[in-house]
Image (cartoon, helix red, strand yellow):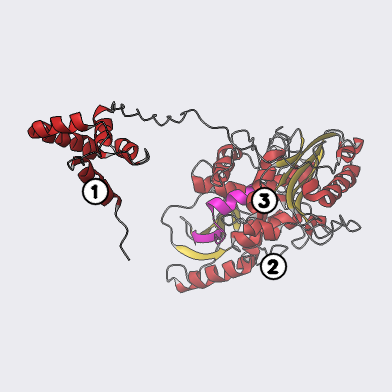
Amino acid sequence: MSEPQHPQSRREARAAEATAAPAVPAAGDGAGGFVARVRQHPRVWAAAAAAVAVVVLGGGAFAAGAAMGAGAPDAATASVALVTETPQPSATPTPTPTPDPRAQPQAAAAPAAVRTCSVAGLATDSRLGTFLGSVRDASTGSVLFDRGATTYARTASVMKVLTSAAALAVLGPDYQVPTTVVKGAEPGQVVLVGGGDITLASGASNIYTDSASMLDLAAQVNAAWAADPSTAGTPITSIVLDASAFSGDRWQPSWNRKELYDGYSSEVTALQVDGDRAEPGANVSARSENAVLRAGQAFALALGAPNAGLAEGVATAGSAQLGQVLSAPVSTMIPDALLRSDNTEAEMLARLVAVKLGVGGDFGALATAIPQALATYGLDTAGLTIVDGSGLSDDNGVSPNFLTSLFIKIQNREGNLAVIADGLPVGGQSGTLAGRFTDSPAAGSVIAKTGWIDTGYTLSGIIDAADGSVLTFAFFALDDVGDSAKTAIDALTTAVYECGSNLSNN
């Protein structure tokens, strides 16, 4: 069985046929004259045949195909046909089109979800007075509900959340506040130096968790006094009270002085005991008009020197230390301040932040210190107005949107903010929310800070909603409002809990 010819072999065979001498035609063929001329001029014929071969081999499949496909003519006719074929020009290839460089249209965005659960009626309750509100989806940060949410206004005690976040950013959760005693410049004199710890107990304990005790401090001082040959056997007759760590006004000018007499807040001083409460174990207790002096009296009693002279002053640099006690860490003090809404403790934390940042020790320093600390969380603090750390002032300015953004950070437990997340009151269960939401389906699912001053009620925090979503919210009921505003806020908060991520802004 013969092997199939390669295409190139077939072309060579055809070329050989074309160059072979033509056969003598049969009689009557009519080609005798032609044959005779070939015989007469064999060299000319050979040259012509060579030319035909060049055309066949170099010029293309078209000529070879014509010779093969005409029904087998004789060789002479094929040769003439090949010689006289007019060459065709090669076709010009069509250029590939260049793509249009213009931008192609993007795929259409997926349609936004239509949220249908409305709380609009509850938000217009007249008991809310001038109402401001914001609700965000904590997973996306998107605002689901907006009622004047960019308006900056007084927050009442919700301000304590900002103060706590600032303290965690600047002081850290492990920071402890010292109270120190050093030798005085005169014989028989000691100096009690307050580092800002308002939780220091006058006795063994007070309302503050794990507070340091003035009794322990006094015992250290008496031991050191007796061990020093230069003072052993001599009485302590004079106590200097150094409260210079904080400066400026001790009562914010915009505060109502009745807060002190009603037992909700003390003066802001770097040296005091029991938050200056007349009853150390009571949350609400009358405060004095001189917190520093009350601390000095407690120390004199603890030393066993009740008749020692007391006067404010400043310790001499480099004086020998006789004793020191430390407060509970910031991580312990913040839940105390949030659960009880302790104004004095919040003011202490705010002032310590300002001192640590080196911007001052007075109320005015807070306007710089608190926003500077909060900015470390990536928050836009440009619109904030901060005049205190507790929220007692009508002059503070914070927007609902700022609060809901901050609470997303708290919910995500960024930095050390888990201290706040775990320390907030819970609806129907703890702190200042223990008596609220008790009959609400949202009980146990509202984790928030309450606020109340004469000109407003506020509530802001986190809602673990019924549908499993997590929302952050801030509601302000301002101006001409009464205690019933709390009921209206709680009803609105419960409705938001029930709506969850389906909450509509309409």
Position of the C terminus, as image quadrant, is: top right
Position of the N terminus, as image quadrant, is: bottom left
Name the one closer to the observer, 444 or 286: 444
**Point 63% across, 36% down: residue:** 384
Q: Position of residue 134 (x, y in %)?
A: 75, 40
Report which residue position mark 2 lands on: 205
Sequence-wise, which precedes: disc 1 or disc 2? 1
Amino acid type at circle 1 is: Ala
Amino acid type at circle 2 is: Ser
Based on the displayed image, in which of its 4 quarters is residue 404 positioned?
Answer: top right
Chain part drawn in magenta: 162-182
**Point 45% across, 31% down: residue:** 99
**479 is higher (above) or lower (below) than 312:** above
User: Does the magenta run of residues contain 177?
Assistant: yes
Sequence-wise, which precedes: disc 1 or disc 3? 1
Amino acid type at circle 3 is: Ser
Name the one closer to the observer, 272 or 13: 13
Q: How far apart, in angstroms, are the residues tagged by discs 1 and 3?
A: 81 Å
Report which residue position mark 1 lands on: 13
Report which residue position mark 3 lands on: 139
Q: How far apart, in angstroms, are the residues tagged by discs 1 and 2?
A: 119 Å
User: Does the magenta run of residues contain 340?
Assistant: no
In the rendered image, the residue lying farthest to the front is 27
How many other residues sit within 10 Å of disc 2, few (<14), some (14-19) or many (≥20)? some
Q: Position of residue 149 (x, y in %)?
A: 73, 35
